[in-house]
Amino acid sequence: MTGAVFTLPVGVLTDLVRGRLLGGSIVLWAVATGLSAAAPSFVWLVVVRGAVGAVGDHATPG
């Protein structure tokens, strides 16, 4: 769901700054994935997995 929400705004931003955004999104995806492994509660896990979805959705081609 978060990927669907962030697709259009991030797509417009990607058209403006393509290379730096892709590199930054890979780093943010890795950090969010690591934080999901250290989630102390279910609520924290849901929030962090939402961030993984928001960041990872625009890091893929297409």
Image (spheres, rainbow, N blue to C red):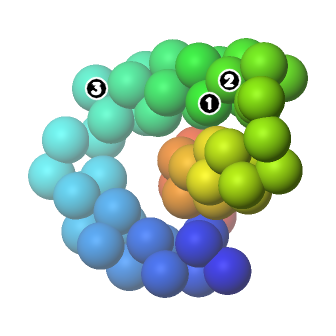
- Name the residue: 55% across, 58% down: 54
Residue 25 versus residue 37: which sits nearer the camera? 37
Name the outermost residue toward the front. 41
- Residue contact between numbered discs 1 and 2, judged by CB atoms under 8 Å: yes
Is residue 5 in sight in this rendering?
Answer: yes
Q: Earlier in the sequence, mark 2 or mark 3?
A: 3
Residue under pointer 2: 35
- Secondary structure under the numbered disc 1 in the rendered image: helix
Disc 3 marks which amino acid?
Arg
Mark toward the viewer: 3 or 1: 1
- Residue contact between numbered discs 3 and 1, judged by CB atoms under 8 Å: no
- Name the residue: 28% across, 26% down: 20
Q: Could you classify mark 3 by the number of other residues whose Cα lies within 10 Å: few (under 14), some (14-19), or many (20 or more)?
A: few
Residue 62 versus residue 39: which sits nearer the camera? 39
| Figure quadrant of residue 31 | top right
Q: In x, y percent, where is residue 34? A: 73, 18
Residue under pointer 3: 20
Quarter of the image where the C terminus is located: bottom right
Q: In x, y percent, where is residue 51? A: 57, 50
Mark toward the viewer: 1 or 2: 2
Q: Could you classify mark 2 by the number of other residues whose Cα lies within 10 Å: few (under 14), some (14-19), or many (20 or more)?
A: some
| Figure quadrant of residue 13 | bottom left
- Name the residue: 33% across, 35% down: 21
Mark toward the viewer: 2 or 3: 2
Quarter of the image where the N terminus is located: bottom right
Disc 1 marks which amino acid?
Ala
Is residue 56 in sight in this rendering?
Answer: no
Tell me the tag on residue 32.
Answer: 1
- Secondary structure under the numbered disc 3 in the rendered image: helix
Q: Earlier in the sequence, mark 3 or mark 1?
A: 3
